[in-house]
Image (cartoon, helix red, strand yellow):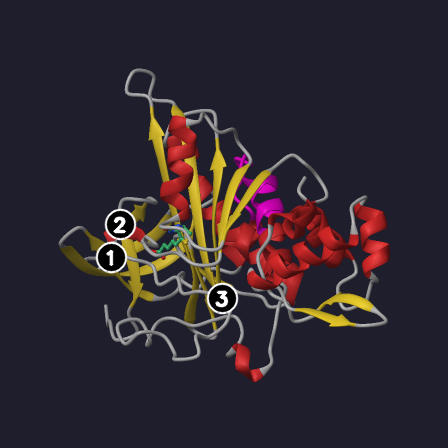
Amino acid sequence: MTVKKSLISLLEEYKGKYISGENLAEKLKCSRTAVWKAINQLKEDGYQIDCLKNKGYKLSEDSDVLSEECINGYLKTDKYQVEVFQEISSTNDVLKRYAVNDHAEQGTTIVSDYQTGGKGRLGRSFFSPKGTGLYLSLLLRPKGTVIDNLILTAQSAVAVYRAVKNVTGIELSIKWVNDLYYKNKKICGILSEGQASMESGSMEYIVVGIGVNIYEPENGFPDDIKEKAGSLLGKKSEGVSIDRNRLAAEIIKEFYNIANDKELAGEYIEKNIVPGKDILVIDGQNIRKARATGIRKDGTLEITEADGSVNTLVFGEVSVRLDESVVL
Ligand code: BTN
């Protein structure tokens, strides 16, 4: 490990408290000059480090830089291989490349502070600005076919629900299939992508990409999404804060805990806002009105069509939009 990496782990451990240069040098088994150089590099990377002549160095409580050292510190295990980027095209695209080209193993996770080409479902883009969200992708090497793994989409939403509750106490709502809502606005979207063998039909890998809007951007959301998009907290400038490294670690833990469960997590049904609502079923170019009546144990959505017939919707085939104006 480089001096810089060991130093950030130590400063994270002492976050909010001063530690002297001498003490740091001793713990890191390096010279005080090496500590000083590494401190300057960390400052350049955006870490808020206060220096006081007789006290040493302190990582400010408000310092909010995503780092592998900090996420691993919360995970307390080396089961997962976490890589953090400050900027990336799309965490899903890069992780898919790792899966195919480098045969990356289950547990490999990419986290980024910013995506220049964040991708959403149905070929849309996903707004992923710097410093206000959390964008991560997690790799699975599951058993079985695509059909056997459809439930994973729902389980991923529950993993985010649980992680946010653990860190903030906030209980989000889930919108079938896997969007998470807070105060009637979408604050998290999930995009699962994978590859199956044409011969056996079994999955080779699945990449689950999760994007969480944590803070409201200082200039608000772009016009095309501002009606729908929300964030967990207000603007950073309003003084609200959350430890994004801790949230990343909780999502990783909760996700890999639940990912292989074949039984749908209870919260998926309890917290789902779709049952009982009038909806628009979007099936490619076709849009039809229906009423959602419930969610089955396999995660499919039970609906009553406009002609009164009962149908079930499967993940991946359609998407639904809540439509308060629909009268069946
Ligand atoms: C959606 O709501 O349409 C799905 C959005 C998924 C966004 C996440 S952010 C991390 C990962 N990388 C991407 O490019 N997309 C997913």
Is 48 inside the magenta-drawn segment? no
Q: Which mark is residue 281?
A: 1
Label 3, ligand 1: CB separation under 8 Å: no
**In which image quadrant can residue 66 be found?**
bottom right
User: Which sits earlier in the primary sequence, circle 1 or circle 3?
Assistant: 3
Look at the image and give the residue range highlighted in magenta: 251-265
Quadrant occupied by the N terminus: top right
Within 10 angstroms of label 3, few (less than 14), some, or many (20 or more) residues?
Answer: some
The CA distance from mark 2 to mark 3 is: 33 Å
Residue 186 is situated, as x and y percent measured from the top left of the image, at: 41, 67
Q: Which residue: 32% across, 47% down?
A: 312
The CA distance from mark 2 to mark 1 is: 7 Å
User: Which sits earlier in the primary sequence, circle 2 or circle 3?
Assistant: 3
The residue that mark 2 highlights is 318
Residue 242 is situated, as x and y percent measured from the top left of the image, at: 62, 68
The residue under label 1 is which amino acid type?
Val
The residue under label 2 is which amino acid type?
Val
Q: Which residue: 29% across, 57% down?
A: 125
Q: Which residue: 52% across, 41% down?
A: 109
Q: Are marks 2 and 1 in contact (CB under 8 Å)?
A: yes
Q: Which mark is residue 131?
A: 3
Give SS at disc 1. Answer: strand
Quadrant occupied by the C terminus: bottom left
Give SS at disc 3. Answer: loop
